[in-house]
Image (cartoon, helix red, strand yellow):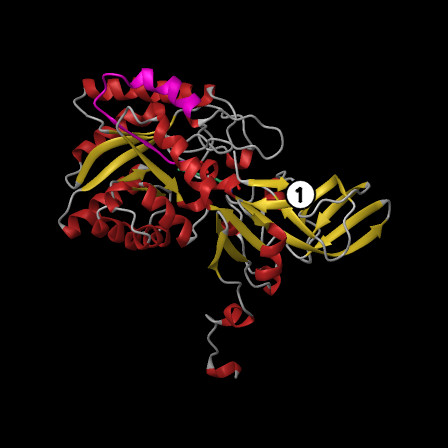
Amino acid sequence: MHFFQYRGRELYAEDVPVRQLAEKYGTPLYVYSHETLVRHFKAYDDAYATFPHIICYALKANTNGAILNLLAREGAGADIVSGGELFRALKAGIPPEKIVYAGVGKTEDEIRYALRSGVLMFNVESSDELREIDRVAHTMKVKAPIALRINPDIDPRTHPYISTGMREHKFGIAISDALEHYRLAARLRNIEIVGVQKHIGSQITRTAPFVDAVKRILVLVDALKRHRILIRYLDIGGGLGITYQSETPPLPSDIAKRLLPLLRNRDITLVMEPGRSIVGNAGILVTRTLYLKQGEGKTFVIVDAGMNDLMRPSLYDAFHQITPVVKKNRTKIRADVVGPICETGDFLAKGRIIDRVNRGEYLAVMSAGGYGMSMSSTYNSRPKAAEVLVKGKTHALISKRGSYADLVQNEVMPRYVR
Ligand code: LLP
């Protein structure tokens, strides 16, 4: 459920016509809905209200500071994968004791930074990493709280690029090797075992893979207990899908109904790491039609947003609905909606039946709040899009449009090229 709806012919973001926003702030423009973000966060918080839990929002989905501030105020923790994300999470006021740190390639500097900050736990992905965290913690004379990321070998039945929990993936530790790794962790003097984590993939639209994965992890938790290794935090990762086209993913409450009975009488805090399901449908990308071009048996709608602004269609062949910001009675055409980037792979939609739009009209690319802006780049020297947050009738810029000066701000000119 989101708050981008048509009122008559006009698409609104909450109580503001999207056209007005595009005219005021220019395009390409990311527009987010405050109410939708809060609602999505609460859907998780309410679903698990009866059980100790921490909702660690996965920053990678969208790192805008205003969105992080808003979620922090709702009580969110953070799932981070880099020092940069830790910096952003702390800056937004997310308490370190609600921050979990994942990723297969944590550097020494990043480990130090996280230890200094006092994060809840490192989600560790290999024995090498475990030893490195132990070594760094030793030099700092602290104990590092860790969970092992366990790969339950469950097929989440999602796109291969965003599926992570199977044996052949680089992520996590095979469940068959889990006990041995926990024993190693227990031997390391500067490591404190606090949890277990799993994450099997993203854009998952069924309940069963989630529940099956948790069941497998609980078998492991019980086995660990027999070895006197106690798990305080059960981190079930993120991955709940959203509706891009016609998917009907379960709600957080549907998953909770299946998981909570499995957790009764366990002295454990549940941690989860949702990203897309919080921000995905809370944001749209607004773009302007520059030209219509009739190709060989094909129409191209050329717009001012490209793969640098929203990479998902090019990278994953992902589907995003595209709809005119102001509806009119029009004929439909089949078209490729493409950006200005000099790449054949620069498209937002392919062979799509859409309303025949005219030059200068605005289009909304829906469900672009997650992995949209956070994966954007300045490829082709295109400054970054602006971002706006709408709350009821009010709206404000939450990230300025990039400038040409921004494009070169980090460049340094050695004397021998001057
Ligand atoms: N936790 C871990 C350990 C993860 O790797 C991820 C996402 C999440 C949580 C959050 O997953 P979510 O709830 O957002 O599904 N760029 C891709 C998605 C990559 C997901 C990477 N990991 C896309 O645009 O579809």
Q: Is residue 157 above or below residue 109?
A: above
- Beta carbon at label 1 within 8 Å of ligand 1: no
- Residue 276: in magenta span: no
Q: For the point 63% across and 41% down, which residue is it?
A: 7
In the drawing, does residue 358 fall left or right of residue 254?
Answer: right
Residue 237 image offset from top left, x and y in percent: 38, 32
Quarter occupied by residue 154: top left
Most foreground residue, 241 or 215: 241
Most foreground residue, 201 or 178: 201
Q: Amino acid at mark 1?
A: Ile
Quarter occupied by residue 179: top left
Q: Is residue 216 above or below residue 160?
A: above
Residue 191 image offset from top left, x and y in percent: 19, 39
Q: Residue furthest right?
A: 297
Q: For the point 21% across and 43% down, which residue is it?
A: 134
Q: Is residue 212 above or below residue 137?
A: above
Most foreground residue, 382 or 411: 382
Residue 219 image offset from top left, x and y in percent: 30, 17
Mark 1 nearby-residue class (10 Å; few <14, some 14–19, many ≥20): many
Q: Secondary structure at mark 1?
A: strand
Q: Is residue 226 above or below residue 144?
A: above
Q: For the point 47% across and 71% down, which residue is it?
A: 409
Residue 174 in sight in this render: no
- Residue 261: in magenta span: yes
Residue 401 image offset from top left, x and y in percent: 53, 63
Q: For the point 82% across and 41% down, which residue is it?
A: 331
In the drawing, does residue 240 fall left or right of residue 99?
Answer: right
- Residue underneath mark 1: 322
Q: How many marks?
A: 1
Residue 319 in sight in this render: yes
Span highlighted in magenta in the image = 253-274
